[in-house]
Image: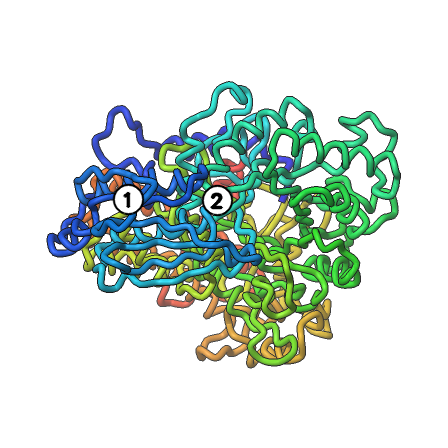
């Protein structure tokens, strides 16, 4: 969400991140820079002995730069893991006792070309694929297997991506700031490019390739036309030259009005021949410098951004104009569905569906419509967007948010894989049971030829990339799920923990347990029972009383609708009827407040304060219980982290331990803000099991005011 407060808070956000930053020059510990590619020496002697039997040579059959990257990565990994220098040869011949990276004949299917197979064959470990990218992904999978000290005997595996376009969306600006960035400034040093290419770009590319991510959008969806200038195209080309070596295509967000603001035309009407010609020339100009350019990401007619509706045209008209410009090239157009009008009588929940579903079948085949996982805006918990399953003729891509916009910035530990999985595993019931959101996104439900999963990046120039060390797990989880959405949250958490923090199984169990519970704990003290709270501000301070905005849906009270009767947004037929946008079996899950799962109760119903819930408590009692137990559970998170201390790098341990202290303080802040505010409507005492807040509501409001003026 675009915020008028962005520049007011950017200095605070940078200070917030810097206060936990580690100085690599004064530290002998783990500063987090290597992410999950640490390649620490194997400590299991028997496993090490197994792999030393295959460390005689690295046989590389591919001659391209991606294959060369694979060979170099394997050489680097083996040297660190096994303590042995292994030479790379372009021909393994009949030799045995090595690792062979084998390029096989390519198939027609792009996704299948990226698949890889790892097996023991003719006395060698063989990583094979139909493409150099597949060899690279297989190489990283092999290194992951070795890092986790898994036996050679369990090595055999075949894997292929479920989704074709797997990418990060960076909301980075030309001035180095990041919208919704909580880990320092932008990675991209625009003022130094193209002459100075930061070595960090390559480490970023390596990290993404290790997860199977094959695309990156470099700039903010609230885009600057500057990126369409020749000056910036050359800067982007310098970054693309690095990404290309790791199979990653570079994309750009575009400003729809660029033909006017940059091109000097009198209009940006997508049906105007001069505008169409301008975009065609611009795309050709880009491809001259970046031959493997990925395409455009577009935010249009949303939150004040210009778009085709400014000229009486549709989203399809705008998207198709850009798609036409890409006809001579491989690139695609990704058109965001995050749109909503300033209608005081409307339900923002319904907006994207109402604008896009009537356009199904009218988009060019090169267009993918990118849909947020939920219908509002990256809330700690949302039902899946009703668009999924309702546009069978239009490829719908998934947009997840990795950066913690509504999840505590860089001071709260919230593992996001359960959020991603909750959405992907949801059943749309289109054409019957089993039509999950994942099957929409991977194309198997409707036969989409082009499929996409995007994650709004949480990376910045902080030494550890993500500010909070545990937030690295969210980048990792997104990448792994974009490759294979059938992986479980627990499996991914365990992988990341072993690769990044510790191989000790007892310590790992404590950390994985903390991660798996962290999302529910956050929801309990932040937005329990289906509350939501987006508003036009910093997106973090607890301000449920906020009721002033330039439009109703930029206030907090619009979403929770607290009054003397109860709490929650009625989205049934007696309210906004947003529930009607889902298939009947989905509606049946949520239409009756007595049967609606408590996690979604207030999303769909305005519930009375004295309403008895399935827990046996009234709504007011249940809310208090959730707020208090959620805040108290951060203490449990601290205990779990403490139990792993002896098996953690001291620097990482201290960093996270300090942040957990902040998280507990802020969780209490959230708890008190909600409880004291809602109590003014419920007119009920806090249950005797819980200690009343030490501050009054006015004192809490004052603390928020202080926060907001930093």
Q: In this view, does 250 lie to the left or right of 139?
A: right
Query: For mark 2, what is the residue?
Result: 699
Which residue is most to the left?
A: 45
Kindly indicate the quadrant of the structure image that contains residue 308: top right
- Of circles 1 and 2, which is in front? 1
* Contact flag, marks 1 and 2 (Cβ < 8 Å): no
Identify the residue shown where x is 64% and y is 63%: 448
Examine the rendering and report whether any part of residue 434 can be seen: yes
- Which x, y percent locates residue 196? 48, 20
Q: In this view, does 76 lie to the left or right of 42?
A: right
The N terminus sits in image quarter: top right
Q: Work out how far the residue at label 1 is from the one at label 2, CA to CA, in angstroms.
A: 66 Å
Judging from the image, what secondary structure is the residue with disc 1 in?
strand
Compared with 171, 564 (above or below) is: below
Q: In this view, does 453 lie to the left or right of 369?
A: left
Identify the residue shown where x is 46% and y is 76%: 617
Colouring:
rainbow
- Which x, y percent locates residue 82? 18, 44
- Which x, y percent locates residue 199? 41, 28
Query: For mark 1, what is the residue?
Result: 58
């Amino acid at each position: 969400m675009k915020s008028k407060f962005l520049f007011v808070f950017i200095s605070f956000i940078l200070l917030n991140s810097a206060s936990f930053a580690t100085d690599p020059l004064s530290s002998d510990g783990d500063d987090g820079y290597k992410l999950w590619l640490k390649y620490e020496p194997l400590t299991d002697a028997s496993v090490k002995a197994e792999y030393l039997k295959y460390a005689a040579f690295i046989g590389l059959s591919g001659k391209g730069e991606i294959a060369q990257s694979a060979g170099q990565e394997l050489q680097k990994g083996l040297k660190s893991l096994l303590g042995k220098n292994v030479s790379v040869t372009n021909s393994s011949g009949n030799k045995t006792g090595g690792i062979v990276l084998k390029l096989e004949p390519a198939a027609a299917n792009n996704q299948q070309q990226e698949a890889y197979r790892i097996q023991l064959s003719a006395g060698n470990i063989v990583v094979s694929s139909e493409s150099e990218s597949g060899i690279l992904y297989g190489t990283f999978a092999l290194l992951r297997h070795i890092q986790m000290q898994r036996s050679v005997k369990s090595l055999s595996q075949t894997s292929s991506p479920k989704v074709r376009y797997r990418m990060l969306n960076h909301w980075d600006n030309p001035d180095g700031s990041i919208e919704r960035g909580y880990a320092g400034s932008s990675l991209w040093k625009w003022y130094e490019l193209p002459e100075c290419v930061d070595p960090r770009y390559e480490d970023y590319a390596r990290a993404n390739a290790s997860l199977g991510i094959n695309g990156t959008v470099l700039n903010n969806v609230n885009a600057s036309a500057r990126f369409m200038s020749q000056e910036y195209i050359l800067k982007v080309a310098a970054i693309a030259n690095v990404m290309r070596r790791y199979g990653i295509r570079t994309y750009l967000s575009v400003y729809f009005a660029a033909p006017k603001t940059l091109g000097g035309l009198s209009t940006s009407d997508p049906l105007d021949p001069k505008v169409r010609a301008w975009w065609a020339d611009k795309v050709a100009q880009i491809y001259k410098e970046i031959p493997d350019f990925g395409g455009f990401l577009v935010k249009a007619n949303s939150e004040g951004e210009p778009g085709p509706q400014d000229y009486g045209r549709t989203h399809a008209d705008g998207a198709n104009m850009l798609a036409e410009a890409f006809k001579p090239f491989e690139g695609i157009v990704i058109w965001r569905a995050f749109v909503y009008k300033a209608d005081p009588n409307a339900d923002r929940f319904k907006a994207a569906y109402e604008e896009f579903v009537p356009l199904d079948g009218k988009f060019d085949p090169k267009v993918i419509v990118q849909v947020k996982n939920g219908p509002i805006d990256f809330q700690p918990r949302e039902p899946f967007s009703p668009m999924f399953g309702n546009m069978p003729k239009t490829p719908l891509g998934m947009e997840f948010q990795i950066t913690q916009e509504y999840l505590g910035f860089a001071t709260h530990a919230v593992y996001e894989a359960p959020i991603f999985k909750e959405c992907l595993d949801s059943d749309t019931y289109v054409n019957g049971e089993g039509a999950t959101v994942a099957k929409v996104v991977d194309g198997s439900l409707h036969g989409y030829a082009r499929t996409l999963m995007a994650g709004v990046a949480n990376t910045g120039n902080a030494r550890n990339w993500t500010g909070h060390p545990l937030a690295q797990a969210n980048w990792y989880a997104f990448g792994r799920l974009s490759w294979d959405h059938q992986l479980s949250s627990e499996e991914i958490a365990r992988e990341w923990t072993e690769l990044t923090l510790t191989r000790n199984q007892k310590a790992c169990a404590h950390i994985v347990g903390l991660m798996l519970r962290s999302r529910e704990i956050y929801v309990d003290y932040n937005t329990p029972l289906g509350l939501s709270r987006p508003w036009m501000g910093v997106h973090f301070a607890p301000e449920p009383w906020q009721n002033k905005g330039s439009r109703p849906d930029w206030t907090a009270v619009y979403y929770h609708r607290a009054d003397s009767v109860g709490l929650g947004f009625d989205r049934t037929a007696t309210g906004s009827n947003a529930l009607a946008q889902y298939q009947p079996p989905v509606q049946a899950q949520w239409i009756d407040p007595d049967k609606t799962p408590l996690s979604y109760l207030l999303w769909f119903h305005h519930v009375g304060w004295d309403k008895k819930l399935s827990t046996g408590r009234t709504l007011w009692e249940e809310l208090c219980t959730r707020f208090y137990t959620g805040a108290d559970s951060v203490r449990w998170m601290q205990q779990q982290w403490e139990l792993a201390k002896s098996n953690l790098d001291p620097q990482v341990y201290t960093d996270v331990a300090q942040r957990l202290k902040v998280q507990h303080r802020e969780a209490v802040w959230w708890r008190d803000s909600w409880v004291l505010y809602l109590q003014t409507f419920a007119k009920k005492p806090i249950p005797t099991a819980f200690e009343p807040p030490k501050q009054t509501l006015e004192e809490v409001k004052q603390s928020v005011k202080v926060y907001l003026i930093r």
